[in-house]
Image (spheres, rainbow, N blue to C red):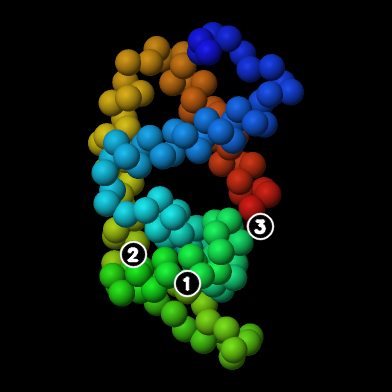
Amino acid sequence: MSPSTPVPRDDLPQQLTLLCSQFARMAARSAKVGVSSVSWRVLATIQRRGPLRLSEIAERENVSRSTATAVIQRLEDEGFVDRATDPTDSRSWLVSLTAAGDEQLAVWRGQMAEHVGPLLEPLPDEDLETLSRAAGILAALVETHDA
């Protein structure tokens, strides 16, 4: 598919979903962040949303509760997250980002910029502006519908 060939509107939801997922995997491989994409997505979600219950993390990342538990345990072992009792339900706990987790996210983002940025450099300014607008639109959709 050529960049100048618009995707038919009926295909847009499927194409956006598929291509965003493929681009994210390609970017993670290129940047060699050294962790699963679930790990850095979980940290980014906690950074954006604040402390979350394990069930919320599993739901947001579309993974099983056991997968979310394993990811959180690994992130806690690395010092990137803390767990604390949920003040509204003592049977649950909230996962929050530590300063080390915040710093690690900045490192991973830097790796993405360093390794994925060059993939974008050959694009004409018009395409870069289009991608910038698309990123803003996608960010607004996520903010609106990922409550």
Q: Does residue 120 lie above or below 105 as drawn?
A: above
**Closest to the observer, 137 or 56:** 56
Give percent across and percent down for residue 89: 63, 87
The residue identified by callout 2 is 101
Residue 15 falls in image quadrant: top right
Q: Secondary structure at mark 2?
A: helix
Q: Nearer the viewer, mark 1 or mark 2?
A: 1
The amino acid on which the numbered mark 1 sits, given as a three-letter code, is Thr
Instruction: Using residue 69 as the reference point, say whether residue 108 is left or right of it.
Output: left
Q: Which mark is residue 69?
A: 1
Q: In this rendering, would 26 be left or right of 4?
A: left
Tell me where residue 70 appears, x and y as whole percent.
42, 69
Q: Earlier in the sequence, mark 3 or mark 1?
A: 1
Circles 3 and 1, Cβ within 8 Å, touching? The answer is no
- Left or right: 135 as drawn, with respect to 118: right
Is disc 3 placed on a helix, strand or loop?
loop
Residue visible at 50% across and 38% down in the picture: 21
Residue 50 seen in the current view: no
First of labels 1, 2 by sequence position:
1
Q: Which residue lies at the image location 66% right of the left edge and 26% below the top edge?
A: 12
Q: Amino acid at mark 2?
A: Gly
Counting residues from the start of the chain, the first of labels 3 and 2 encountered is: 2
Marks 1 and 2, how far apart at CA: 17 Å
Dot 3 surroundings within 10 Å: few (below 14), some, or many (20 or more)?
few
Q: Which residue is mark 3?
A: 147
Real-space CA distance between mark 3 and mark 2, rounded to the nearest whole angstrom: 22 Å
Q: Residue at x 46, y 13 (%)?
A: 126
